[in-house]
Amino acid sequence: MKNYFGKNRKLIFAILIATVLWSVGNFYLRSKFHSGECVRALDGYTWHINNYRFGKYFLMGWQGNAWGNEVKMDKDILEREDISGIIAYHQVVCPEYNPNNN
């Protein structure tokens, strides 16, 4: 058994590194929501997703009939569930800016 691992040590190490990189990449490079979509929190607040990079969402909030400044939010906040298992943010249709509607 010792000779088997000795001969294939590089292969085992490469498989281990690939598995770790895939797991980390899967978390940080994949997102549940995508650019251009809007999500609404359980409290009714609406966010527009501008971009997603390395575990961070870049969003604008809808307030006072207009989009606000861009903010950064961690992936684990936007994709979380509350204590009872209800998804905290869900996709909705984006509201449109209307300057005549105050």
Image (spheres, rainbow, N blue to C red):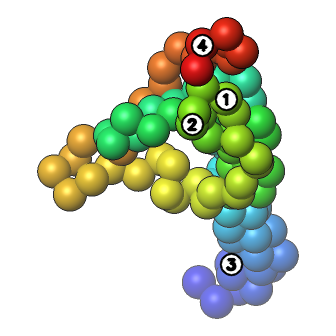
What residue lies at 71% left-to-right and 15% top-to-bottom?
99
Q: Quadrant of residue 24?
A: bottom right
Label 3, on which residue? 4
Q: Which SS class for mark 4?
A: loop
Residue nearer the viewer, 96 or 84: 96
Q: Position of residue 70 (x, y in %)?
A: 76, 48
Q: How far is mark 2 from mark 3, CA to CA?
A: 64 Å
Cα–Cα gap, marks 1 and 3: 65 Å
Mark 1 vs mark 3: which is more N-terminal? 3
Distance between mark 1 and mark 2 Cα atoms: 6 Å
Residue under numbered circle 1:
66
Quadrant for the C terminus, please.
top right
Q: Amino acid at mark 2?
A: Gln
Work out whether mark 4 precedes mark 1 in sequence or the reverse, and give the earlier one.
1
Tag 1 and tag 2, C-beta contact below 8 Å: yes
Give the Cα separation between the discs numbered 4 and 3.
Answer: 74 Å
Nearer to us: label 4 or label 1: 4
Q: Is there a contact, CB below 8 Å, between mark 1 and mark 3? A: no
Q: Tell me if residue 28 comes above or below residue 51 in the rendering.
A: below
| Residue sitting at the far left | 84
Residue at 22% x, 47% y: name it. 85
Query: From the viewer's perspective, is 11 left or right of 22?
Result: right
Query: Residue 63 bears which disc, if any?
Result: 2
Quarter holding the N terminus?
bottom right
Foreground label between 4 and 3: 4
Cα–Cα gap, marks 2 and 4 = 13 Å
* First in residue order: circle 2 vs circle 4: 2
Amino acid at dot 1: Ala
The alpha-carbon separation of the residues under discs 4 and 1 comes to 10 Å
Question: Which numbered mark, 1 or 3, is in the foreground of this view?
Answer: 1
